[in-house]
Amino acid sequence: MRTPIMAGNWKMNKTNEEACELASAVKEASGAVTGTEIVLCPPATALSTVVGCVEGSNIEVGAQNMYWEDSGAFTGEISADMIKSTGAQWVILGHSERRGRFGVIEEGFTEELQKVFGDTDASVNTKLKKALAAGLKPIACCGELLSEREAGNTDEVVAGQVKAMFEGLGDCSSAGFVIAYEPVWAIGTGEVCDGDEADRVCGVIRSVVAEVAGEEAAQAIRILYGGSVKPDNVEGLMAKENIDGGLVGGASMKADSFAALIDAAAASA
Ligand code: PEP
């Protein structure tokens, strides 16, 4: 039996004051809920603040990205140890917004500009190795573009991303490694992936993990679905065999809607 996880990705939103207000409201609403793990991922500037605001509750905190080196001339980057020193225990890696895999090119942006953060399968793998070695719990993201789905390449794209995550990783069955399946076309669009289809792709991911890391790892690893998860669609998703929780953007930034998602995850346990 895998413990569900409900993780909120606040992206580039919330000043320290706003982050503490939201974290405190989530703590008030859901801080004592058991049966699911709860993770808040504020911007790096608010990690310490949020860790302080949720102290004494069941809520844990994560970063949205990290670099693989320990220190040095890497302007603007943060290391695994820096994240840990805030009290945070988790890190999201390879989110499609960092891989430059956007569903839509924002007005005024060229495709090149959107790729500016530059994560690749190889860099995500390097970051994963560092995060695991440092004792951080990674949430590693994968997912297909709409064009890839329409071309019938979903399974191939996602399997390729997951295989690349595990390259040279060694034994990770007990390391708290979490994978998030996030179809890019469903992120922030309001268009959720059909539950059966999301479950099917998460099943493909689990079989890839079995192939590259063994059956024990495949059964232990939690696979989250992400992409327009909302209170009105969460129950159906959480009921699926291969979906062990959610990685949520929009609906995690209001305490009442995130509380509903947390309750659904806990009820699915
Ligand atoms: C995300 O940021 O990973 C995400 C899934 O966003 P949303 O829930 O808003 O689609």
Image: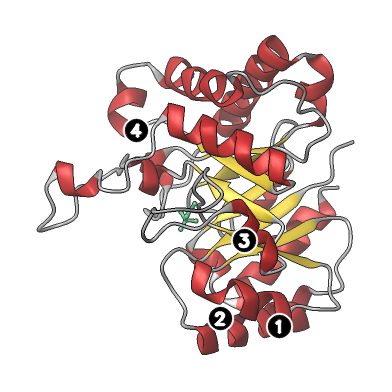
Question: Could you tell me the amino acid type at mark 2?
Answer: Ala
Does residue 195 appear in the picture of this structure? no
Q: Which of marks 4 and 1 is nearer the N terminus?
A: 1
**Mark 2 — residue?**
19
Question: Could you tell me the amino acid type at mark 4?
Answer: Leu
In the image shown, does 263 or 221 lie closer to the viewer? Answer: 221
Q: Earlier in the sequence, mark 1 or mark 3?
A: 1
**Mark 3 — residue?**
83
**Mark 4 — residue?**
145
- Coordinates of residue 218 in the picture (x, y in percent): 76, 22
Circle 2 SS class: helix
Residue 268 vertical position relative to residue 107 in the rendered view, above or below? above
**Mark 1 — residue?**
53
**Tag 2 and tag 4, C-beta contact below 8 Å:** no
Q: How far apart are marks 2 and 4 (CA)?
A: 31 Å
- Coordinates of residue 116 in the picture (x, y in percent): 25, 48
Query: Taking 90 as reference, is 232 left or right?
Result: left
